[in-house]
Image (cartoon, rainbow, N blue to C red):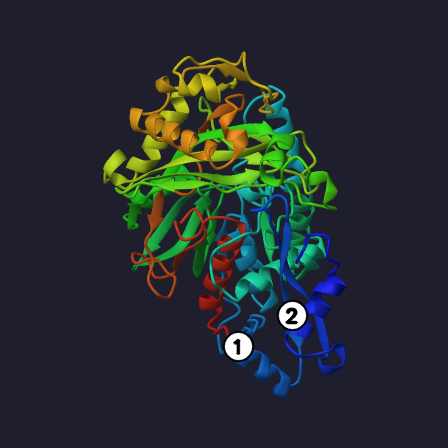
Amino acid sequence: MPWNTSDEDIIKDCLKKSGLTHADVFSASIYKAAVDARKQQSIKKVCSVLIDAGEVVEQGLLNRGAKRVAGAVTLSVGGCRKDEKVVIVGFGPAGMFSGLLLAENGFKPLIIERGEAVENRAEAIKRFFSGGELNENSNVQFGEGGAGTFSDGKLTTRIGDSRVRFILETFVKYGAPEEILRQAKPHIGTDNLQKIVRRIRERICELGGEVRFNTRLVDINIRGGRVVSIKTDDTEIECDKLILAIGHSAHDTVKMLLSKRVNITSKPFSVGVRIEHKQDDIDASLYGEKRHKYRNLPVGEYQLSKRFPDGRAVYTFCMCPGGKVVASSSERETIVTNGMSLYARDGENANSALCVSVSAEDFGGGPLDGMEFARKIERAAFNVDYCAPACSTRGFLSDKPSLADINVTPSYKPGVREADFREIFPGFVIDTLKIGLNDFSRKLRAFGSGKAVLTAPETRTSSPVRILRNDGFSSVTLKNLYPCGEGAGYAGGIVSSAADGLRTAENIIGGNTE
């Protein structure tokens, strides 16, 4: 429908097309809504309408191509032992949702998190951005809520799983705006996420669970093919089941697990840079110069990609409208970048990762080779004051790095420094990024100005390893060890990580989803 069409008129039109009126159904509402700006002179709103109707009407709608909406996740709990000692390592989305589901079903999980509670974590991050010391255990990567808490809070996912709706509804229950339930590309923003993760933690504790911060896993004790206890920096904890939701940056934990002969392989991931434009330039490129005639257009966001015959790809990822590029190092003497937005997305700049896929053919076949490949890039980018290497897109494409011709103020703190990316990345990454920039400039005008700023490096797009598990979600090596989420190599983002945490908890509980 035309963008300015009201929700009421959209629902009325949908019912009319279905041969129905409001009197024929119990209720009708907008289920999902998105913008279609492919024709800038006629921007459209694309909606799906949710109709609750009696059986006869429902069957008629299904015969005409309507789809039945997946029901809520239901859990049938059998005769499982709720007194089992379940320990969860990591309080990102996977650890949080597995802990919440366990607690709501009578378990009393103990969750350990190497970082700080979110309010203290935010202060540690603020100090680092201002030039203070990096806290290696509490930063943009580690701490309550995981890496996603200090990002855009994107809730988009490609997984076809009924748990997605459950996850969105859970976020709303704990304080997210209700409109995320109907957005085609929902996001929460780091400001809302900080409040939500704290409330979920409080609920887990209210139900008898426990969350210990500043508690890092350093070792596991194995007997008879099972983990019998874990060691932290200052204590030993017995456990019957151990859920690993460690996140994609817990390199020390992965090394420890490998030393215990846990079966781990490397997996493909991506490396690249953050590209930063003026948000107004992105909006103009997407919606056209007459965009102001449309009411309440969302802040412009994009997703661009190019795939090559050999399987390599260059693409944009984790686009943060109205956001900032943030310092995301978790190890000293390294530079890592990421993107972050508040819910309002009202900042002056837009940024996204501009990434090149890499695989074992690029970095070697050993379990840790991908991790070391990324670390080498992060160390090559390091400067003593943690200022990140940067240059204009024009300077990068011409091999004459410069910051003199940019039209955007770089948002990265502690700051940026002019640098030649050829001293940081392998040649094939540089060449592929150039091809991508040239291709994307034909798809989105802002990419062709040459005045955007590139800030390097982006290396934590996903985990470089996979901790192998069986169909019951436990490790192929240790039957009571449950690797899950992004750090274990089974998810990529907040929602898919949360869903994997739920599936893991379901397997421990012994129930079945319907």
At x 41% / y 26%, what residue is drawn?
378
**Does the image show residue 81?**
yes
Secondary structure type for disc 1: loop
At x 54% / y 11%, what residue is drawn?
404
The residue at the far bottom in this view is 56
Name the residue that disc number 1 marks. 76
Disc 2, disc 1: CB below 8 Å?
Answer: no
User: Which of these two is toward me, 308 or 21?
Assistant: 21
At x 68% / y 55%, what residue is drawn?
2
Give the image location of residue 470, x and y in percent: 33, 62
Earlier in the chain: of badge 2 and badge 1, it is: 2
User: Which of these two is toward me, 249 or 155?
Assistant: 155
Name the residue that disc number 2 marks. 50
> What amino acid is at disc 1?
Ser
> What amino acid is at disc 2?
Leu
Give the image location of residue 513, x and y in percent: 50, 72
